[in-house]
Image (spheres, rainbow, N blue to C red):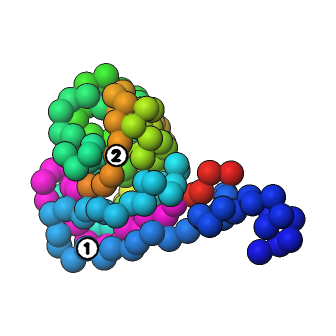
Amino acid sequence: MPIGQAKFGLLGGVADPGKLELIETQTASGDNIVDFTDIKEDVYNVHFATIDVNLNSTSSVQIRLFESGVLETGSVYQTAYQNGQATGTFSVNQTTANNRFFATQTGSTDEPRQSYNYLYNLGDSTKYSFQTMQGVSRKTGTTACDIRFGSGVLPQASQVNAIRFTNTAGGLLTGTISLYGIAES
């Protein structure tokens, strides 16, 4: 530890401020759900998830949050996403009554989907939980991609202590999802 940091107690025995630290990587092999149950919400105020999966249906990956151990499936998530198709068509998907966050772009069966998702304030029971994301679905047999980017909020102050990733069509996931923590700087 640098002397200056030790002298002022800046690290305080927790994660290095601003440092990206791997919490867990899970590999799905035709699984219905991927749950992260130890998200270290008491250590990190920002979480970062990378997704690299194929789905067995025309769908996308969704995120649902566990509030104090209870999965929130109600239509209480507020979301706004911009979708761009390889054909040049763009659309907006926004609602104040969603039952999930979208974590990737929608693609056809077995098209690869990748995305980055940031999740904020999960462990703070006095704040709302937020999500921002950007993702692609590569069109099979081409170099073209469909894109999605946007954000969402769970507008109820609660402590989120776990995260669930699933296929929006209820199908299966194959690939990897990694969850990182970013310490408050």
Disc 1 marks a residue whose amino acid type is: Ala
Relative height, residue 166 to residue 156 (above, below)? below
Say which label, 2 or 1, has the lower sequence index: 1
CA–CA distance between discs 2 and 1?
Answer: 23 Å
Q: Position of residue 116 (x, y in %)?
A: 48, 56
The foreground one among 181 and 5 is 5
Q: Residue at x 12, y 54 (%)?
A: 170
Q: Which residue is mark 1?
A: 28
| Magenta stretch contains residue 48 | no
* SS majority, magenta: strand
Query: Can I make out residue 76 in this image?
Result: yes
At 34% from the left and 46% from the top, the residue drawn is: 160
Find the magenta span and give its range.
Answer: 166-181
Residue drawn at 75 percent across, 60 percent down: 9
User: In what quadrant of the picture does the N terminus appear?
Assistant: bottom right
Q: Looking at the image, is mark 2 or mark 1 nearer the viewer?
A: 2
118 is higher (above) or lower (below) than 9: above
Residue 115 seen anywhere in this rendered image of the structure: no
Q: Circle 2 is placed at which residue position? A: 160
